[in-house]
Image (cartoon, helix red, strand yellow):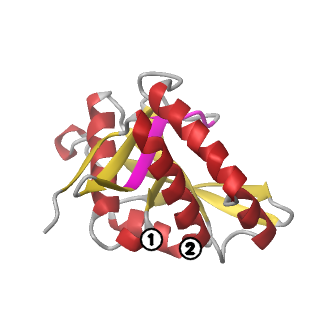
Amino acid sequence: MADVGVRPARRPDAAAVADIQVRAWRRFYRDLLPAAVLDEVTSPAARDRWHERWAESITAPPSPRHRVLVAVASDLVVGFAAHGPADDPGAAPGTAELVTLLVDPAHTGAGHGSRLLAATVDLLRDDGTETLITWVFEADEAMRAFLGSAGWAPDGASRTLDMGEPVREIRLHTDIREPRDRPEP
């Protein structure tokens, strides 16, 4: 079995992160987003912009609580996750947001997503975070099932993105406090 793990992203990882994002979006979002939008956000020019944005996110995050993690297998970056403080209006103190979590389509099903999610939760617990939220496409059944298996559930919030046609997202949340630290029901 190959050596696998999760570590903080480094500047040289930005290219791999951008490539994974483009490949994952092309594969996993092809039935979720309008074709013209998907073509635009996964074009070679867009890939170059994503590379620049990820390099900046990795080397100059907006705060110390904004982090990008990468999953590695035999020193190859195979997935990534980004998180930071929640900026949703009305988010309770102690809430963070999982901004994205993607695994290269060629490496799904090997536990990389679960390792990224666990590492994210560990870091956020150390920061004192109690609740973790994320926005997912309502029609993204695979991501909803993955997060649901880890204890995430819809919290009732939704939004509609205008992508030439409406694309609905729902917000999921989970309590990431240690079980002994949670209030009694």
* Near-viewer residue (82 or 168): 82
Q: Which amino acid, by three-letter code, is at mark 1?
A: Pro
Question: Measured along the vertical axis of the image, is residue 112 above or below residue 85?
Answer: below
Q: Looking at the picture, how far across and down is residue 120, in whole percent?
A: 33, 44
Q: Looking at the picture, how far across and down is residue 21, in whole percent?
A: 54, 57
* Near-viewer residue (95 or 167): 167
In this picture, residue 70 sits left or right of residue 142: left
Disc 2 crowd, CA 10 A, few/some/many (<14, 14-19, 20+):
few
Q: Looking at the picture, how far across and down is residue 25, in whole percent?
A: 59, 65
In this picture, residue 40 sits left or right of residue 139: right
Q: Is residue 99 visible?
A: no
Question: Measured along the vertical axis of the image, is residue 134 above or below residue 73?
Answer: above
The main secondary structure of the magenta stretch is strand
| Residue found 22% across the figure and 37% down from its top | 181
- Residue with the mark numbered 2: 27
Q: Looking at the picture, how far across and down is residue 168, in whole percent?
A: 71, 63
Q: Let me know if residue 87 is in the magenta part.
A: yes
- Residue with the mark numbered 1: 105
Question: Measured along the vertical axis of the image, is residue 172 above or below residue 54?
Answer: below
Q: Secondary structure at mark 2?
A: helix
Disc 1 crowd, CA 10 A, few/some/many (<14, 14-19, 20+):
some
Q: Which amino acid, by three-letter code, is at mark 2?
A: Arg
Q: Which residues are magenta?
A: 79-88
| Residue found 69% across the figure and 51% down from its top | 46
Residues marked 2 and 1 touching at CB (< 8 Å) = yes
